[in-house]
Image (spheres, grey):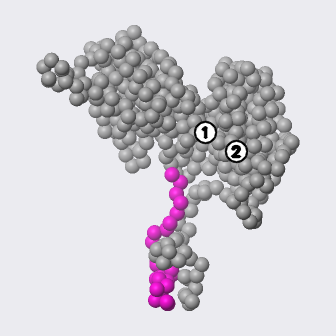
C-alpha cells in the first residue's frame, strides 16, 4: 500500500547531522602494569607484549621508564603509562623532559609526590582530548619508603600501596586486594580481620611473577616477558622474567 | 508500486526499519584532506637477517578495488643506508617523501660529515605521524623504517597513522601482519634469531611471503621491489621482481564466490 511505503521525502530534512565515518584517534595496545610499594622499596612491573587487535606487534617492548633524577640513585622515579601506546610514549617523554627541567631550575631532585602532581596537571591539561592511558608512578619518598601513585586518563590520582593497570587490571586487582591489602582475610585464632603489613621484597617478587604468570593464562593481551623495575636506596634494578608466548 | 522516486533503491522500511534520511542528506561536511585514503598501497614486509634488514612491497596503487597504478614504488631510499617502506595512501606517501627530502637537504647544509641514520629518520617520522593524528588530520599510512643503528646493528621500526610505534625483528603492515608475519617468525621470532639467518635465507622467506600475499590479498600485485640494507652500509634495490612458481590449482576448490553453482 502507498501509505505503508510512504516515508518522509528524503529532501525535506535540512542537512543538520551529517553522517560521516570519522578517523578514530585512539587504539588499544594491550599489556598490563602493576606496582607495589614496600617499607624500603617500590616496584613497578609490566609485560613487554605490544598488540593491536588479535595481532602481536612485538614480543619485547619494555614499557617501564626510569626518570634519572638529581641527588643519587635512590631518587630515581619509575613511570609506566599503559593503554594507547602512542599517547603513553608522548606522556612519558614529556614527563621526562619536565622532570629534567625541574632539576635544572631548582637544583634538587624531583620528589615522587611532586612528580605525581606534575603528571596530574599534564593529564588534566589534555582533559578535552585525553591521553588514553592508565599511568603509574613509583619511587621512594624522603624517608626511603616506597610510594606508588596511580592515575586515570584525565589525571585523577591517589597514593596507594599497590595498583594494577591496563588490559588485565581487573584480573590482578582483586588478587592484590586479597594478598597485599589482606582484604577478606581473617586471623584464624581471633577471627578478626587481618591487617595489611609491608611485604618483604622477596615475597613481593614471587607474588608479582605468580600474578603475571596466572594473568597470562587468562588474558590474551598479556604475555612474552615480564619486566620488573625495583627502586631501592641502591638505585633501580631491572629484572626480566619469561611469560608464556601463546 | 511506490511512486516516490526518492524511496526507490533504498532498504525496505518494513524489513530494515525507517530509512535514516540523514544519510541521503549528509552534505560534504567540513573537508580536510585524508579522512579516508583513496589511492592505496597494500602491505610492506620486512625482516632482519645476520647482515642487515630486508624489505619488500609490491608495485600496486589501488583505487578501491580497482588496480589503478601498477608501477608504484613504495620502498624509498632515504640517505645512503636507510630504506623507508610505506603502505596506505599514495598522496600522503608523496608528502612523506617530500618531508624526508627536505630533512635530508637540511641535514646536508653543514657538510659536517654527519648523516641521518635509520633511528633518526624513524624518530622524525613517528613525531610527524603522532602530531598529525593529534590534529585529527592523519597521514593515512603505516610505515616501516629499516637501516642501521648508531652502534652498527640492524634497525627496523614501525609507525602508523595513529603514531603507534614498535620494533621487532620481523614486521609487516596490513594483511602482511596476518599472512607474512607467521612465515617470517618461523625463522626470525626473537632478536637473537636474526644472527642465524643468511641473506639468501631471508630472501627466500621474503619471496615466499610476497607470493602468499599475492595469492590471498586481493589488492596486491605479483610485481614487487625487494630492498636489502646491509651492515656495510649498502642498499640494494631489486626492482620488478615477479612471483615465481605460482600454483593456482587451489583456486578451483574455493567455494562461495563467483559463479559456481555449488
Residue A124 horizontal side relative to residue A25, left or right: left
Q: Which residue is mark 2?
A: B43
Q: Position of residue A239 (x, y in %)?
A: 48, 16
- Chain letter of disc 2 in the image: B
Q: Residue at x 39, y 49 (%)?
A: A128
- Chain letter of disc 1 in the image: B
Residue B254's tag is none
Q: Which residue is mark 1?
A: B159
Is residue B168 placed above or below A203 in the rendered structure? below
Q: Position of residue A238 (x, y in %)?
A: 47, 16
* Dots 1, 2 in contact, CB < 8 A: no
Residue A221 horizontal side relative to residue B210, left or right: left
Front-lying residue, B110 or B142: B142
Q: Residue at x 31, y 32 (%)?
A: A174
Where on the picture, by quarter, is residue A55? top right
Where on the picture, by quarter, is residue B169? top right
Front-lying residue, B170 or B214: B214
Q: Main secondary structure of the magenta part?
A: loop
Where on the picture, by quarter, is residue A108? top left
Of pointers 1 and 2, the one earlier in the residue sequence: 2
Q: Residue at x 48, y 24 (%)?
A: A226
Please provide the residue range marked out in magenta.
Answer: A1-24
Residue A100 horizontal side relative to residue B98, left or right: left
Residue A197 located within the stretch drawn in magenta: no
Amino acid at each position: 500500500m502507498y501509505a505503508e511505503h510512504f516515508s518522509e521525502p528524503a529532501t525535506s530534512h535540512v542537512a543538520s547531522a551529517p553522517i560521516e565515518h570519522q578517523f578514530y584517534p585512539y587504539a588499544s595496545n594491550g599489556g598490563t602494569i602493576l606496582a607495589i610499594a614496600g617499607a624500603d622499596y617500590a616496584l613497578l612491573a609490566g609485560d613487554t607484549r605490544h598488540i593491536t587487535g588479535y595481532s602481536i606487534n612485538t614480543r619485547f617492548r619494555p614499557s617501564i621508564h626510569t626518570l634519572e633524577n638529581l641527588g643519587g640513585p635512590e631518587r630515581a622515579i619509575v613511570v609506566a603509562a599503559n593503554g594507547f601506546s602512542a599517547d603513553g610514549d608522548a606522556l612519558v617523554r614529556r614527563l621526562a623532559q619536565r622532570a629534567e627541567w625541574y632539576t635544572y631550575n631548582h637544583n634538587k631532585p624531583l620528589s615522587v609526590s611532586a612528580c605525581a602532581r606534575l603528571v596530574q596537571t599534564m593529564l588534566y591539561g589534555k582533559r578535552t582530548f585525553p591521553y588514553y592511558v592508565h599511568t603509574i608512578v613509583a619511587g621512594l619518598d624522603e624517608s626511603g619508603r616506597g610510594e606508588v601513585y596511580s592515575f586515570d586518563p584525565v589525571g585523577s590520582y591517589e597514593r596507594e600501596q599497590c595498583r594494577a593497570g591496563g588490559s588485565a587490571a581487573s584480573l590482578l586487582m582483586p588478587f592484590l586486594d586479597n594478598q597485599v591489602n589482606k582484604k577478606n582475610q581473617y586471623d584464624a585464632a581471633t577471627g578478626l580481620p587481618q591487617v595489611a603489613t609491608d611485604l618483604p621484597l622477596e615475597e613481593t617478587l614471587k607474588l608479582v611473577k605468580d600474578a603475571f604468570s596466572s594473568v597470562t593464562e587468562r588474558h590474551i593481551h598479556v604475555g612474552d616477558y615480564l619486566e620488573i623495575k625495583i627502586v631501592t636506596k641502591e638505585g633501580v634494578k631491572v629484572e626480566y622474567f619469561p611469560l608464556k608466548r601463546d | 508500486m511506490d511512486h516516490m522516486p526518492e524511496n526507490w533503491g533504498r532498504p525496505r522500511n518494513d524489513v530494515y526499519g525507517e530509512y535514516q534520511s540523514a544519510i541521503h542528506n549528509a552534505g560534504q561536511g567540513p573537508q580536510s584532506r585524508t579522512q579516508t585514503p583513496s589511492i592505496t598501497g597494500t602491505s610492506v614486509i620486512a625482516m632482519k637477517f645476520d647482515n642487515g634488514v630486508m624489505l619488500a612491497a609490491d608495485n600496486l596503487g589501488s583505487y578501491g578495488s580497482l588496480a589503478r597504478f601498477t608501477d608504484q614504488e613504495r620502498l624509498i631510499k632515504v640517505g645512503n643506508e636507510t630504506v623507508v617502506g610505506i603502505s596506505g595512501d599514495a598522496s600522503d606517501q608523496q608528502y612523506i617523501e617530500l618531508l624526508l627530502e627536505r630533512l635530508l637537504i637540511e641535514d646536508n647544509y653543514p657538510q659536517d660529515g654527519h648523516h641521518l641514520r635509520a633511528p633518526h629518520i624513524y624518530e622524525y617520522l613517528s613525531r610527524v605521524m603522532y602530531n598529525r593524528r593529534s590534529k585529527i588530520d592523519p597521514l593515512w599510512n603505516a610505515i616501516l623504517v629499516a637501516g642501521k643503528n648508531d652502534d652498527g646493528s640492524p634497525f627496523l621500526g614501525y609507525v602508523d597513522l595513529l603514531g603507534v610505534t614498535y620494533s621487532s625483528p620481523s614486521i609487516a603492515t596490513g594483511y602482511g601482519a596476518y599472512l607474512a608475519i607467521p612465515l617470517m617468525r618461523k625463522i626470525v621470532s626473537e632478536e637473537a634469531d636474526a644472527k642465524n639467518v643468511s641473506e639468501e635465507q631471508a630472501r627466500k622467506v621474503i619471496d615466499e611471503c610476497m607470493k602468499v600475499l599475492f595469492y590471498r590479498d586481493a589488492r596486491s600485485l605479483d610485481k614487487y621491489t625487494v630492498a636489502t640494507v646491509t651492515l656495510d652500509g649498502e642498499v640494494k634495490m631489486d626492482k620488478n621482481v615477479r612471483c615465481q612458481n605460482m600454483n593456482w590449482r587451489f583456486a578451483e576448490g574455493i567455494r562461495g564466490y563467483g559463479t559456481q553453482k555449488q
